Amino acid sequence: MTPPITIIILNWNNAPDTIACVQSLKQSSDLAPSLLVVDNGSTDDSVEAIQNYDPSITILRTGANLGYAGGNNAGIRQALSEGAELICILNNDITVEPGFLLPLMEAICKNPDVGLATPLVVEDVENGQVWALGSIISRRTGVVKRQHVGEPIDIWRNQEPIDVDIASGAAMLARREVFDRVGALDESFFLYYEEVDWCLKLRHAGFRILGVPSSIVWHKVSASLGSSSPFIDYYMLRNHLRLILRHWGRALRIIVFTRTMVRNLATIIAYTIKSHQGARVRNRNARLLALRDVLLRRWGKMGSDVERACQAKP
């Protein structure tokens, strides 16, 4: 008997991608999961557009932008309260191949020590190429590296699941027991590295994480913020350093934290010397403010001063 499954899709000011994700799920008829769209405080007509597309879709409105962790946690709480035994988190810029869910479910249900399964995530470019089959994390450097990037997808389609350090936050399936024992995503990260933090907690609690190549989803990379956004620079740097402070032992923590600080200070200097007619000034300022907030232990959503610096014209 198939356990109750809920798929959570987080929407923020991007109904077209959310609708495309839902359309692909409707074409993937395996297992008949429940679908929950969480609208994360959109300021456009997202909710109306999604309802017009399909009035039967359940939409949970958070009323404010709670970030990746906060928005998904709202959906997770509702799904658990309604009896879900498996919860699938999908970015709204994901589209799925038919039958993607069954291999993920089997990977978890056949292995009691597996808490989380992540599919083969394919970059949505011509002919497709691997964007990630899970990630590994270096204890020596703190760097999280997506696995098998750029490889042809066809060499992976029929491979068996493999153990990975980190699941892709863009697409992952978790068993209920994970939330009971480890809890949900840490909302103080707000954006980026929250799934890395969560996966490290899972593994510390004794759960395995599997990458499942026979489950395939397609990912529009950086659809929300853009690949060179200063907002990304801020959250990526601040939260990476926070991750190191939380999960590394004392001696190694000092080494890895210091190396990361020095590397980013060098980038800040480079952005100052070669600003490309001011184009890099916002990115430089975002990194400086990220370092400040790490030292001051300021987490959660960025402050208004950081937001202004990220939005300032070059």
Image (tube, rainbow, N blue to C red):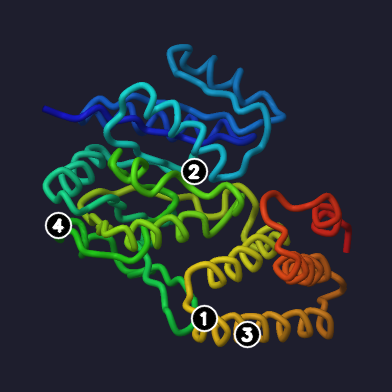
- Label of residue 74 in the image: none
Question: Residue 68: horizontal and vertical position, in percent?
Answer: 55, 45
Residue at the spot x=32%, y=46% of the render? 178
What's the CA distance linking mark 4 and mark 3?
A: 42 Å
Q: Nearer the viewer, mark 3 or mark 1?
A: 1
Tag 1 or tag 2, which sits nearer the N-term? 2
Is 252 left, or right, of 29 in this rendering?
Answer: right
Residue placed under numbered mark 2 in the picture = 93
Residue placed under numbered mark 3 in the picture = 258
Q: Amino acid at mark 4?
A: Asn
What's the CA distance linking mark 2 and mark 1?
A: 38 Å
User: Disc 3 on helix, strand or loop?
Assistant: helix
Residue placed under numbered mark 4 in the picture = 158
Tag 1 or tag 3, which sits nearer the N-term? 1
Residue at the spot x=65%, y=84% of the render? 263
Tag 1 or tag 4, which sits nearer the N-term? 4
Is 108 left, or right, of 77 in this rendering?
Answer: left
